Image: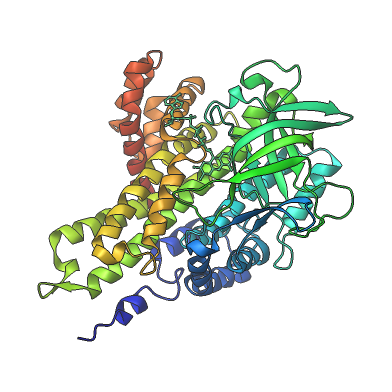
């Protein structure tokens, strides 16, 4: 019997902007686009569905996984990260030509493109975008030295010919959530510092600029003593040549690449600093708040967008398969349980994208305003809920393709499923963000009635009573925290439904 999957493959479509009515609606609602920006979005929709999808599939093959080449042929330590040509090509388009690592133009159009790019789940590109976005925002807000300005200008000038991007190294072997326990030490050296010690999870280690958290010698213990530094990847004596034999790393060694469940196209390393030159960003004793406000907030939005994009891709693939595949003489999409999963996927995806756009809208709010408090709280609630849903529903999506869902080359679903687990952990595991949200509700004196009304668009919303109950219990961790996951899910649903005008 001859059996063809062509109809299924064609139904996945060749333009992921044109097939996404909700995305177009949200862009139209929020963005004020120049004609060129609109055309750019339309063009990008076809590019992500075509050449970029093919590049992502190539980069994801096990034989193309990033490699560490520690020494060159003359026994010189080079610590080169060897990436496949497909990753370089995708970076050149997305981080270079499109410059999706440094905000420019209309923010809604910018993040709409980011969401489109993330639908390929190419973590070697996605992580680069998130880290570069975070560092450029930080430097734009706090940069006050020539080195800061140089790095910012270089990243903003990233191009297809020369991609310039960033990474951020905070997590240490003894723990990532408790940044106040950081032990990497920074020793003063003129107006700069020299960094010593080890970082444990360093993604996009092939970047040009690193943001590194470290404790200046003599600084107090705990989070007050953690400062943040701009660290160039390569030594500054002479023009560094990336991936060239004579490129000398700036006083650190890449010890090992992680062997990860997901985001396997992305080089994540263990790194030991031994005198790397770096320049502090912002006041030394404000490192952690500045890291959270400018860098971690950006990465958490990236996680939400990545999860929304994962849901969109699952919805698209499963929708096409449900129309194509028959079992017992009927398209599987006719079965109530299959329809149920499709409905769950569609609803979760719409809410996720709506919440992502709402976060982008609230992001620039001024400190002290209700909107700024909402942004902090909503981001901490949305990241765990939406990334968890992406994991759960990517799992369900795979199963709807039956055995074909498990085959790595049949669709990107196995890869998206593995990456989804990383989005849950990276930039703050769920519990840590729930705890942060509760602390912010208390610290920012958020009024439960007003908060619930802003989230849901309704007065007297029952969310208010839940928030009040958790605030009343906030001094008793064991009473308050178990209620946070349910509150977070209810907030995401109510906010998503308000934006979607359900
Ligand atoms: C693929 C990948 C790439 C990464 N890339 C980077 C990178 O580039 N740079 C970087 O700095 N880090 C990176 N990380 C690390 C990531 O940010 C950390 O894993 C994360 O911050 C959690 O730290 P941890 O793994 O040490 O877990 P821990 O902090 O040890 O937490 C362990 C568990 O305890 C729970 N827990 C901790 N505190 C609390 C609390 N107060 N209440 C309740 N539960 C709590 C957590 O929820 C978690 O489940 C990466 C991680 C992955 C998986």
Quick check: 105 above or below 182?
below
Residue that protrudes farthest toward the left in the picture: 328
Where's residue 352, x and y in %?
39, 50
Q: Position of residue 92 (x, y in %)?
A: 65, 66
Q: Quadrant of residue 104?
A: bottom right
324 relative to 294 in the view: left or right: left
Residue 262: give x, y in percent of width and height.
45, 51
Is residue 288 toward the left or the right of residue 387 in the image? right
Left or right placement of residue 467 versus residue 445 in this view: left
Q: Quadrant of the N terminus?
A: bottom left
- Asked whether 224 or 231 is in front, the reply is 231
Please, which colouring scheme is shown? rainbow
Tell me what residue is drawn at x 41 percent, y 56 percent: 416
Examine the rendering and report whether any part of residue 160 can be seen: yes
x and y percent of residue 398 in the render?
30, 59
Q: Nearer the viewer, residue 117 or 59?
A: 59
Q: Is residue 495 visible?
A: no
Residue depicted at x 36% and y 23% = 481
Residue furthest to the top in view is: 475
4 lies above or below 408: below
């Amino acid at each position: 019997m001859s059996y063809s999957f062509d109809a299924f493959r064609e139904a996945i479509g060749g333009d992921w902007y044109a097939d996404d009515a909700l995305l177009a609606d949200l862009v139209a609602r929020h963005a004020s686009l120049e004609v060129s920006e609109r055309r750019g979005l339309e063009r990008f929709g076809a590019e992500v569905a075509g050449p970029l999808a093919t590049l992502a599939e190539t980069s994801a093959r096990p034989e193309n996984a990033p490699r560490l080449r520690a020494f060159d042929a003359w026994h010189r330590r080079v610590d080169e990260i060897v990436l496949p040509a497909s990753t370089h090509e995708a970076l050149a388009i997305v981080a270079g030509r499109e410059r999706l690592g440094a905000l420019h133009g209309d923010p809604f159009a910018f993040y709409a493109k980011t969401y489109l790019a993330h639908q390929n789940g190419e973590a070697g590109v996605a992580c680069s975008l998130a880290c570069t976005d975070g560092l450029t925002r930080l430097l734009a807000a706090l940069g006050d030295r020539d080195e800061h300005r140089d790095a910012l200008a270089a990243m903003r000038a990233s191009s297809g010919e020369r991609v310039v991007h960033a990474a951020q190294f905070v997590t240490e072997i003894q723990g990532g959530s408790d940044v106040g326990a950081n032990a990497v030490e920074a020793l003063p050296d003129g107006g700069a510092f020299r960094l010593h010690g080890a970082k444990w999870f360093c993604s996009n280690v092939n970047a040009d600029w690193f943001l590194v958290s470290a404790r200046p010698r003599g600084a107090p213990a705990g989070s007050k003593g953690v400062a943040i530094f701009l660290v160039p990847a390569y030594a500054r004596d002479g023009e560094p040549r990336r991936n060239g034999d004579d490129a000398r790393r700036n006083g650190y060694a890449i010890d090992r690449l992680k062997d990860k469940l997901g985001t396997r196209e992305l080089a994540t390393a263990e790194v030991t600093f031994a005198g790397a030159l770096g320049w502090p960003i912002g006041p030394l004793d404000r490192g952690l708040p500045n890291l959270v406000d400018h860098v971690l907030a950006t990465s958490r939005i990236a996680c939400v967008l990545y999860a929304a994009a994962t849901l969109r891709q699952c919805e698209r693939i499963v929708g096409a398969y449900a129309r194509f595949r028959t079992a017992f003489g009927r398209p599987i999409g006719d079965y109530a349980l299959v329809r149920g999963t499709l409905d769950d996927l569609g609803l979760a995806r719409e809410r996720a994208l709506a919440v992502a756009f709402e976060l982008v809208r609230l992001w620039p709010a001024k400190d002290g305003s209700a909107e700024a408090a909402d942004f902090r709280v909503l981001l901490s609630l949305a990241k765990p809920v939406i990334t968890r849903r992406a994991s759960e529903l990517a799992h369900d999506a795979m199963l709807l393709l039956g055995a074909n869902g498990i085959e790595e080359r049949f669709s990107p679903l196995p890869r998206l499923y593995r990456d989804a687990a990383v989005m849950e952990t990276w930039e703050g595991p769920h519990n840590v963000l729930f705890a942060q949200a509760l602390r912010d509700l208390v610290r920012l004196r958020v009024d439960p009635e007003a908060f619930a009304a802003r989230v849901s668009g309704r007065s007297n919303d029952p969310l208010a009573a839940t928030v009040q109950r958790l605030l009343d219990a906030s001094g008793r961790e064991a009473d308050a925290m178990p209620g946070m996951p349910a509150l977070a899910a209810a907030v995401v649903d109510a906010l998503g439904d308000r934006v979607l005008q359900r």
